[in-house]
Image: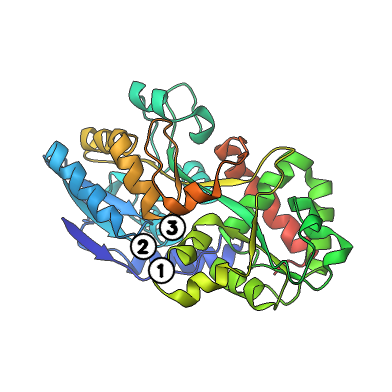
Amino acid sequence: MVSIRLPKLLIVLRFAFLRRQLALAGLLLILPLSTSVAQQPEAGVLNLYSARHYQTDEQLYSDFTRQTGIRINRIEAGDEALLERLRSEGARSPADVLLLVDAARLWRAQIDGIFQPVQSDLLARRIPAHLRGKDDGQGPLWFAYSTRARVIVLNPSRIDPQLVRNYEDLARPELKGKVCTRSANSAYMLSLIGALSEHWGLAQTETWARAVVSNFARPPRGGDTDQIKAVASGECAVALTNTYYLARLQRSGNPQDRALTDKIRLVWPNQESFGTHMNVTGGGMLKHAPNRAAALKFLEYLASDRAQEFLANGNNEWPVVASATRSNPVLQAWGNFKADSLPIATVGRAQIQAARITDRVGWR
């Protein structure tokens, strides 16, 4: 197995001038897997571009090779860096499969024409319809393989927990100066706001976003772990986070990390309406894949019960296949919740309007 790690680039989906800079950087990322001519099939090989970088993925790849005899060459980088690389390589790309970790980025790959449709009875049976990419009758362009929720965390010593039960509540005037959030450049934020616009409409979503901005305790900064720490310290009373960041802290071998989580409370938003927003890890077969048979085997393998456990546990997420084992102790302790069933492909598409909304309301 060949593993090449690339430095992550700044992920910016919104501004054209930054995308041009990323395109130039993508040219510099071309490594020996790429050649000046179209790639030829190579027996027993799969070339994988992956935005995932978790230790349990090593078990995933090894298990696939053990079962199929197919060796995996892979390149790991940030989502946008991989997309820029593929745009640069074009038909010369050696890559067979692309794995990404956000619905908006999967949608971006879809509209860029990077994926090819995949027809598979196995994937049709095992992957729920709302967790697949666009299908024009020739098969979905990508598939989601694990899910995570975007939830609210609050500090009960700073705010009455009854005030915050839904995403709408982040706009309440009682939360003035109490909300922490990451930048609107975050694909996770754009996916959430895009999903809300599908449920509420653009006008209501913009009104909500403007009120949330007026409730900021500080300018947006940092990642989701920073938001959790800010709530635990009392810098703010409430914040948004993906569930796996919270689960990492709860499962940490560092007692200080676990102590942070004792100071906060997890809220599953909108349990009496459309449910908690979900995002995904997903992937598909690339348009110019030279090893298509190996690519299909890998995509189908990812939907197996065994691979589902590797994928989900690797990042404290939930498997998408109903029969897959759910053995994560933290997620089990959290119990069941109502998840939003909005089609993931719709969430990706809606991020364009979400970016416009955040621009207008000053969500920087």
Quarter that holds the C terminus: bottom right
Asked if residue 116 shows in the view, the reply is yes
Q: Position of residue 163 (x, y in %)?
A: 81, 57
Q: Which mark is residue 111?
A: none
- Rounded to the nearest whole Å, what is the CA distance between mark 1 and mark 2? 6 Å
Quarter that holds the N terminus: bottom left
Q: Do the numbered discs 2 and 3 sit on residues whose CB atoms are within 8 Å?
A: no
- Identify residue type, mark 1: Lys
Q: Which mark is residue 77?
A: 2
- Identify residue type, mark 3: Asp
Instruction: Give the residue pinned by disc 1.
Output: 8
Q: Quadrant of residue 278?
A: top right
Q: Do the numbered discs 1 and 3 sit on residues whose CB atoms are within 8 Å?
A: no
Q: Position of residue 102 (x, y in %)?
A: 50, 51
Asked if residue 39 shows in the view, the reply is no
Residue in the picture at 48% in, 66% down: 249
Q: Do the numbered discs 1 and 2 sit on residues whose CB atoms are within 8 Å?
A: yes
Residue in the picture at 62% in, 36% down: 342
- Rounded to the nearest whole Å, what is the CA distance between mark 2 and mark 3? 7 Å
Instruction: Give the residue pinned by disc 3.
Output: 79
Residue in the picture at 64% in, 78% down: 233
Q: Residue furthest right?
A: 173
* Nearest to N terminus: mark 1 or mark 2: 1
